[in-house]
Image (cartoon, rainbow, N blue to C red):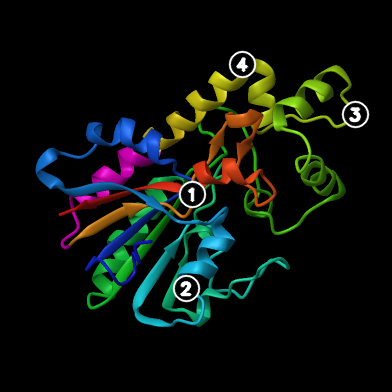
Amino acid sequence: MIDIINDIKWKYLIILDACRYDCFAKLYREYFDESMIISFAKLKTYARDTREWLHKTFDGKYYNEIVYISANPLINSKGILPKKRPFDAREHFFRVIDVWDYGWKDGTVPPDEVNKTVFVAKDIYKDKRFIVHYVQPHEPYVSYDNTYSPQQLFGFYSDLKTKLNNILLKFISHETLWTFLKKYPIIKTTWGMRKIWENGGREAIREAYESNLRYVLSYVSKLVRHLKGIKVITADHGELLGEGGYYGHHPSYPPKLQEIVYQVPLLVIK
């Protein structure tokens, strides 16, 4: 496993949340000129979600030279920690900038808010390195009318429905569960992957995911053209898009499907 913090001499490490290797490989050449690309490869994070990635990457370490620009509420400077696998970013980085706190809009953090922050921070902290963490391509999907709070999106709380859902998914797939709930709607939903699946099936979810990836890549490509130094674009983990009937990413999914979640892109550009 490549140690992306120490093995590559980057100035900017860009994290696309829940970005699959294959989808990125399909699209990235549309956004980055060949002359910019140093290398492209598949990376295995061996992380099933953001929390596991944070612990595997940063536990026991402090990086005085890194400023973390975060659109993901799990990485914050406020000491707001989930009960399950808490990660206190203040113990690991010189500074954490909470884009998720002031940049939240329409159920997500738009990538332009992240870009604006980077342009300001790079001039303030000229001698630092930067980790830039976008929400996308993680849901909510911009092509659908979804409304999320930071707590819903990154799981700071878990109500009874969510707990029941997670228990069921240890034994059956999303599609099996959703087929049952479509026929017997004892748990209703008006947003998220289930709603998209009910309206358009597996292909609709993949199209929504790729739309989100295009959305963030359009802003990342604009950003990197104005940054000096080596830039690395990768992800904390991947995403299931219907394999075995499962979607998203969760530690309880079958081990053979976790192999797909582990696979993320590693693009190095100048």
Query: Which of the marked residues, 1 or 4, is nearer the chain's N terminus?
Result: 4
Query: Which of the marked residues, 3 or 1, is nearer the chain's N terminus?
Result: 3
Residue 90, horizontal then vertical, whole percent = 51, 79
Query: Which amino acid, by three-letter code, is at mark 2?
Result: Phe
In-image side of 250 versus 110 (left or right): right
Q: Nearer the viewer, residue 15 or 225?
A: 15
Query: Which amino acid, by three-letter code, is at mark 4?
Result: Gly
Span highlighted in magenta in the image: 216-229
Question: For the residue labelled by badge 3, is the local secondary structure a helix, a strand or a loop?
Answer: loop
Contact between marks 3 and 1 (CB within 8 A): the answer is no
Q: Give the class, few, some or many, for how many residues have Cα within 10 Å of label 1's Cα (few <14, many ≥20).
A: many
Q: Give the class, few, some or many, for how many residues have Cα within 10 Å of label 2's Cα (few <14, many ≥20).
A: some
Residue 247, horizontal then vertical, whole percent = 62, 35
Q: Which residue is mark 4?
A: 200
C-alpha gap between disc 2 and disc 4:
39 Å
Residue 70, horizontal then vertical, whole percent = 46, 61
Contact between marks 1 and 4 (CB within 8 A): the answer is no
Q: Which residue is mark 2?
A: 58
Disc ID at residue 178: none
Query: Which amino acid, by three-letter code, is at mark 3?
Result: Ile
Q: Which residue is mark 1?
A: 262
Name the quarter where the C terminus is drawn: bottom left
Q: Give the class, few, some or many, for how many residues have Cα within 10 Å of label 4's Cα (few <14, many ≥20).
A: few
C-alpha gap between disc 4 and disc 3:
21 Å
Disc ID at residue 186: 3
Residue 180, horizontal then vertical, whole percent = 83, 23
Contact between marks 2 and 1 (CB within 8 A): the answer is no
Name the quarter where the N terminus is drawn: bottom left
Point 66% across, 44% down: residue: 253
